[in-house]
Image: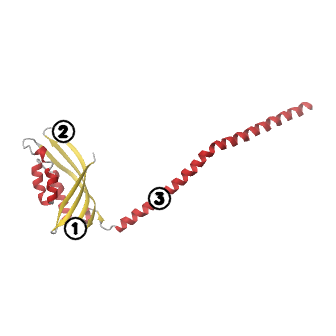
Amino acid sequence: MRKVLILISVLLVFGLGYYTHFAISENAYKDKLKPYVKQQEEDRSVMEAQQQRLGDLEKEVNELEKENENVSNRESLPDGINDLVINYVRDQFNYTSTIMRNENLQPYITAEMVSYFNKSEGVSANQSLRLESKLQKYEIGKYYLEDATCKMTVRVWTSFQIEKNPKMVNQMLLDLELVKNDDVWLVNKQEVGIIN
């Protein structure tokens, strides 16, 4: 019987020791995790704040879109603007010399734009150099119309070849500013962004 009591005592001591070790280890583990838990809570609060800010910004964008009734697409472009953009883009990108292009663009641009196109005459001013630019397609994007000014973006696909070199296909964004001068719309400014 004494052996049984000794065995039970040993088991209780080991069991109590194991439990104590486990409890201490668990607390030590929790202590090690506290900074991570705290960081996770801080991150969660930052994410919630950013989600709230994103929601506020989305509401603000929706309100601005509702306020701006002058934003539209090609279907509602006034005829004068639509015709101008079609002719301007066609004549700007279908040419075999920049001199010819610049002459063809004269009816569609203001005096300020003449110098813009004259800067590019250097390459093709040499009449012996054979080049060809062709408009593949274009898309008129959003526009902003206010009184006698219209700002718009046009996406253009062109091909360009000099002499017998391989044809280069380009995709560009044209940011145009149009002005109404004596009931005629003209291109007043242009910025070009190459996509590819």
- Asked which quadrant contains residue 57, the reply is bottom left
Looking at the image, do the residues carrying marks 3 and 1 touch, with CB atoms under 8 Å apart?
Answer: no
Q: Amino acid at mark 2?
A: Pro
Asked which secondary structure carries label 3, the reply is: helix
The span from disc 2 to disc 3 (Cα, nearest Å) is 50 Å
Asked which secondary structure carries label 1, the reply is: loop
Q: Residue at x 72, y 40 (%)?
A: 24
Q: Residue at x 76, y 39 (%)?
A: 20
Q: Give residue 166's mark.
A: 2
- Asked which quadrant contains residue 104, the reply is bottom left
**Precedes in sequence: disc 2 or disc 3:** 3
Asked which secondary structure carries label 2, the reply is: loop
Rendered position, 6 above or below 181? above
Across and down, in percent, residue 100 comes to 9, 51
Q: Give residue 148's mark.
A: 1
Which of the two discs, 2 and 3, sits closer to the camera?
Answer: 3
Across and down, in percent, residue 144 comes to 28, 63
